[in-house]
Image (cartoon, coloured by chain):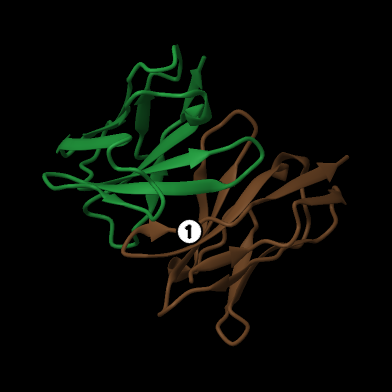
Chain colours: A brown, B green
Amino acid sequence: AQRVTQPEKLLSVFKGAPVELKCNYSYSGSPELFWYVQYSRQRLQLLLRHISRESIKGFTADLNKGETSFHLKKPFAQEEDSAMYYCAPGNTGKLIFGQGTTLQVKP
Amino acid sequence: GAVVSQHPSWVICKSGTSVKIECRSLDFQATTMFWYRQFPKQSLMLMATSNEGSKATYEQGVEKDKFLINHASLTLSTLTVTSAHPEDSSFYICSARDSTDPYNEQFFGPGTRLTVL
């Protein structure tokens, strides 16, 4: 069965600290991989996608096919990064969302 | 960027009535739209995939007669919750895929809060 695991419900760090939001997935075939972010009182929006290998707002994500992981990283967290982050593998446009991790960046 | 709207943003209805929620892609064409349900402090659960001009594909456990989906044009999909009951109260979110996007990015609407009394 398709499954996405984000083990941390809440991740709290201080401003300037490194951040890693974990994502492990179980998915048949080779899914496309995305990270979506939802800031307070805003709609869900794409943060980054694996296929384009781009870095958005300083975030990167490395795909490890052996471990089926797609962890999201940022070397120096900023207060404006506080949000809910969802890992979402998918295929033909259909996405499966993880439970989400709330990132709280303290001043 | 691509924008998706939903209407209404919130609705309160009596038990037994039907409620229609609209999802529109404002500046792009979407042959495929998706409907999600989100419970408080939980993730998005995919309910169905809406395909323009054809029947929607429902996820396992989602009653198609309860949640009617119509995707009559390339910019509009509707979700009708029929004979709503309090347990249908939830946050309903739609998303749309740009037909020309090779990366399958989904653009999300702001969501509709449904409260059934």
Q: Nearer the viewer, residue A106 or B116?
A: B116
Q: What is the x, y in percent for residue A106? A: 86, 42
Q: Residue at x 16, y 44 (%)?
A: B52
The part of the image, by quadrant, that contains residue A73 is bottom right
Does B44 sit left or right of B77 as displayed?
right
The chain that hosts pointer 1 is A
- Numbered disc total: 1
| Amino acid type shown at disc 1 | Ile
Name above or below for residue B17 compared with residue A19: above
Side of A87 relative to A6 (left or right): left
How far across and down, in percent of the image, does residue B10 sit? 47, 18
- At a point 27% along the width and 38% down the height, the residue shown is B65
Tell me what residue is drawn at x 37 percent, y 58 percent.
Answer: A94
- Quadrant containing the C terminus of chain A is top right
Where is residue A96 drawn, in percent x and y?
A: 48, 59
Residue located farthest toward the left when viewing the structure as drawn: B53
Helix, strand or loop at mark 1: loop
Q: Quadrant of residue B102?
A: bottom left
Q: Quadrant of residue B28?
A: top left
Left/right placement of residue A19 relative to residue A106 reads left
User: Residue A21: x, y in percent?
Assistant: 71, 61
As drawn, the residue found furthest toward the bottom would be: A66
Could you tell me which residue is drawn at 44 percent across and 16 percent down? B15
Q: Is residue A91 above or below residue A103?
A: below
The residue that mark 1 highlights is: A96
User: In front: A29, or A85?
Assistant: A29
> Callout 1 environment at 10 Å: few (<14), some (14 to 19), or many (20+)?
many
